[in-house]
Amino acid sequence: MLTILRSAFIALAIAGLAACGPSQARPTTGGAAPELTGIDNWLNSPPLTLRQLRGKVVLVDFWTYSCINCIHTLPYVQQWHRKYKDQGLVVVGVHTPEYAFERDTGNVRDAVRRFGLTYPIAQDNRYATWKAYGNLYWPAFYLVDRSGKIVYTHFGEGDYEKTEAAIKAQLATAR
């Protein structure tokens, strides 16, 4: 009986995610990366666009500061930023709030400082970039190649070695 209830709960949770998510389909690997749009504030950087970053490898990281899964990924993301920024990687953290208190720029700024994040952070309070990507998860990584195409995605924690290998592979491609 417990197994049946658990299966039913999982099916309802998946259906709920689909119902709550945007109607736009998520961009596929190999497709053009959507632009960073509707950003309320930028921390650690002036405003950026993917068009400006063409020719660079870009890791777009959807996160929010009170999500424990996101918090677990931040040291890896910061390390990749430090390790590969001089080789052409640009990390853009897209802070998309789950709760109302996460919309406050002061709270986001405090979290960025507390976690020691030095890469650009886009505050996506209106979910404009989130919706453009058709994103459904915190955390979520979208790796964009030098021509602006999504070449790798990862949702949730883990697979850090695989994500770093994808970053290194893109950085190794000719400029």
Image: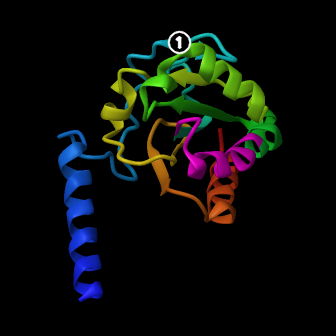
**Over which residues does the magenta segment extend?**
63-78
Question: Which of the 4 quarters of the picture holds residue 44?
Answer: top right
Q: Nearer the viewer, residue 166 or 19?
A: 19
With 67 as the anchor, is 23 left or right in this view?
left
What crowding class fits label 1: few (fewer than 14 Cα within 10 Å), some (14-19), or many (20 or more)? Answer: some
Q: Amino acid at mark 1?
A: Asn
Q: Identify the residue shown where x is 53% and y is 12%.
A: 41
- Colour scheme of the rendered structure: rainbow
Secondary structure under tag 1 reads strand
| Residue 16 to residue 79: above or below | below
Name the residue that disc number 1 marks.
41
| Residue 164 to residue 146: above or below | below
Q: Nearer the viewer, residue 11 or 172?
A: 11
Residue 173 visible: no
Figure quadrant of the C terminus: top right
With 37 as the anchor, is 138 left or right in this view?
right
